[in-house]
Amino acid sequence: MAVDAEAEFHVLAVDDSLIDRKLIERLLKTSCFQVTTVDSGSKALEVLGLREDRTTPSAVSPEHNEIEVNLVITDYCMPGMTGYDLLKKIKGSSSLKDIPVVVMSSENVPSRINRCLEGGAEEFFLKPVQLSDLKRLRPHILKGRSKDQQLQREENSNTIIISSSGSKRKAMNEEPSSERTRLRFSTGSLTML
């Protein structure tokens, strides 16, 4: 099932360096992600349907914004608009703020890393990005999925049951949790089951 989720997962990769862009594209495709690459923050905003001068989606026809992006991975240092500027525009948009953003850089500058993470980035990767780095994206797969898919999953897991008395109640999955523990008291010791 994880493979299906990843196959639907669309990543927008933003980097002004052709070599780095091709590397991240190849790594993401190797991990079974759909990938769209662009070479600037302003082009990323176009793909996302956000005008560079505004923080609300533009009234552009659907043909210009037909891809649903589940995650943005961007270089920090780019001419024009930096990766941090792109992060702030995405997080400042009411319609895009839930899209996870990962920032990457070849420079290990702690203040830059903290600034991005505090600004809303989910992760900060040091270049060159490696396949092992992409494993850190897995927790963001569900976060980056569309709201419709999340709602559909929630509807499938929770149902409304009408009892014979006519009252409604929400039924929850009542599978035993592997995290539950029971304490058993006996003379002189405490045992966890």
Image: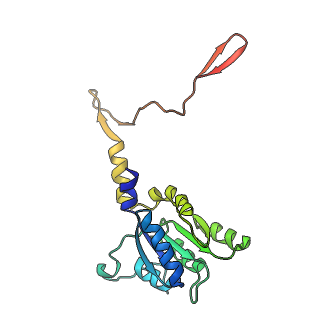
Image: 138 above or below 96: above
Vertical side of 113 occupied by 190: above or below: above
Q: Quadrant of residue 120?
A: bottom right
Identify the residue shown where x is 32% and y is 40%: 159
Q: On the rendered structure, is 142 left or right of 87?
A: left
Tell me, yes or no, if residue 156 can be seen here: yes
Percent of width and height locating residue 167? 31, 32
Q: Residue furthest bottom?
A: 80
Image x and y of residue 174, in percent: 41, 32
Please report the residue visible at 69 percent of the width from the left and 68 percent of the height from the top.
Answer: 114
One can see residue 71 in this view: no
Figure quadrant of the C terminus: top right
What x and y, as percent, mark residue 136?
55, 59
The residue lying toward the viewer, choosing from 125 and 30, is: 30
Q: Nearer the viewer, residue 191 or 163?
A: 191
Between 125 and 26, the residue placed more toward the observer is 26
Tag count in the figure? 0
Q: Residue at x 33, y 47 (%)?
A: 155
